Image (spheres, rainbow, N blue to C red):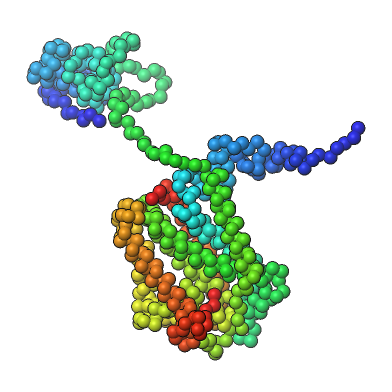
Amino acid sequence: MKLKPPSPGEVLDRVRETEVWKSMFRPGSIFRRGYKDTSRDRALATMNNVLYHLHPVKMKRHGLKLTYTFCLGGLSFFLFILLTVTGIFLMFFYRPMADIGGAIAYGDMQSIRTAVFFGDLVRNLHRWGAHLMVFSVTLHMARVFYTGAYKPPREFNWVVGVILLFLTLGLSFTGYLLPWDQLAIWAITVGTSLAGYSPFVAKQANFVLLGGVVVGPQTLLRWYVLHVLALPFVLVLFLSVHFWRIRKDGGISGPL
Amino acid sequence: MARREETPLDQETYERVLAEELAKGTDRRVAEGRARSAAVRAYRAAHGDGASATPAGAAPAPAAAAAAPAPATAAAPAPAATAAPVPAAAPVAAAMMPTPVREAPPPTGNVPEPKKGAPEKHRLLALVPPEGIQRVEREQGDRINVWPHLLIEEFIALLVVSAGLVVFSTFVNAPLRELANPNLTPNPSKAPWYFLGLQELLRYFHPLVAGVTIPFVIILTGLAAAPFIDRNPSTKPGDRKLAITMFTMLFMFGATLTIIGSFFRGTGYNWVWPWAQGVFFEL
C-alpha cells in the first residue's frame, strides 16, 4: 500500500482539530474550524478575543464612516503600541549616561545608527512615530470637539483625553533629550526655561525637572526613567480609563 | 398610571375591629388588614357610597375577614379580590375589567396555615397595571457587527499608517547633531515643534503670561473645562456656532504661532522668510 503525504490543507485541518489548537482559540475565533459567517459567530469573534473585546459586539453604522473619526483615536493608540515596541528595541542598545568626558548616551546613539541591525530604521520609526502621535492626538481632540463628542455623558472622558494629550507631550518632550546631541539639550533647555517662570516654585520646579540648575547628566537619567517607565505607566492607566469610558458612555458618539 | 387614592376610613370601626382581632390572637398584620377593610365598608355604608353592595357595615368583622384575600394585601387600600360586586372598587380592579371567571374555589377568608417545616416566606400579592411596569425603550437603530466591518477598517488604517511610516523612515533619517555641548549655544535655539507656539508667545508676553498662564491656566484648564462650560446639549454644527468658532480660533491661533515659530524664525530668533533666508527648523 502506498502512503500519500497529506496536503497542507489537510494538515491545517488536522491541527485545528487538536485539543491544543481548540484550547487557544475560543469559540467564534476565525482561526477555529467551523467558523461560520453568521451573526452569532461574528459576535463571538469580538467577544472571545482579548484585543477585540475592547470593542462592543455591535456599533452604530455611522461610526464606520471614515470622515467621522478619521480613525484618529485608534491610530494614536496604534502609534503608542508602535512606539512601545520600537522603544523596547532601542532600550537594548542605549545607556542614559552623559558624564563629562564619557557621553555614553551619544556614543550609543551613533552605534544604533551604524552598528545595530535595523537600528537606524527603528530609531527613525520611533522618532517620526512620536511626532506623528503628537499630531494625531491633537487632531483627535479637534475631531472630538467638532463632533460634540465631549458632551454629556462623555464630559469626563474628554477630561481624561486632555490629560492624555499632555502626557503624550510629556513623553515626546522627555524623549527629545535622550539622543544627547546639540539639538536635544538646547531644545530642552529652551523648553524647560519656561518652568523657571512658574510662580512661587520657580527654582524648585526647575530643580525637580532638571535634577540640577542646568540640563546635565542627572537630567538625562531622570528623563530617561520618566520616558521609558513612569510616563508610559501613567499613560496606560489613563488610556484604560479612556477606553473603558468609551464603552460605558455608549460607544461612538453621534450621528450628527 | 392611575393615581392611588386614599380611601376614607371609619376610624372608630377600624380601632374596634383591630382590638377585637388582636384579642383573638390574630397576627397583627392580618388584623390590621381586616380592620382596615371593615373600616372602609363602614365608611361606605355610612356615606351611601356603595351602601347597597354589602351588609358588611352591619357586621363588619366577619364580612371583612371574608373579603381580606391574603394577609399581605393589608397595604392595598381596597380589597383586591373583589369577588363581591363592589361598584366603587379600587381603580386598579376597574382597570382589569372584564373580570375573568374564577375557577378556583372562593376564598375562605382563613389565613392559610403554612405547612409544617415550610420555610418562612413573604407573601406578596399585588395587581400591577400595565402602565406601572417600567418599559425600557432603547432605540435599536441601525447597528452593525464590529467584526468584520469596523475591525477591517481599523486594520486597513493601521496598515496604511505603518506602511507610510516605514517608507518615510527608510528614506528620511531622524536628525542627530554633534555631541551636546553646554558651552556652545546653537543659533537659533528652538524648543520641539509642539512648544514653538509657546516660544513664539514669549516674544510678545512676559514669561509669566506666555510660559505659565496661557499654557496651563488657559489651555489646559480651559480645555478640560470645556464640557462643563458648554452646556448646549446639541451636537449639530448649526446649533453650536459659538463653540465651533471659539475652538477654531484657539486651534488656528496655536497652529499659526507654531508655524511662525517653526519656519519664520531664524538666527537670533528674528523674523525670516523661509523661501529667502532658508528654514531654521529641525524635528
Depth check: A104 or B153 in front?
B153
Q: Quadrant of residue A41?
A: top right
Image spot of residue B39 (x, y percent): 15, 21
| Number of numbered callouts drawn | 0
Q: Which residue is drawn at 49% across and 87% down?
A: B267
Image spot of residue A7 (x, y percent): 79, 40
In the image: residue B33, left or right of residue B252: left
A149 vs B112: above or below: below
Q: Residue at x 64, y 76 (%)?
A: A109
Whether residue B27 is visible to the viewer of this picture, yes or no, is: no
B159 vs B198: above or below: above
Report the quarter where the N terminus of chain A lies: top right
B168 vs B44: above or below: below
Whether residue B252 is visible to the viewer of this picture, yes or no, is: yes
Q: Quadrant of residue A16?
A: top right
In the image: residue B90, left or right of residue B126: left
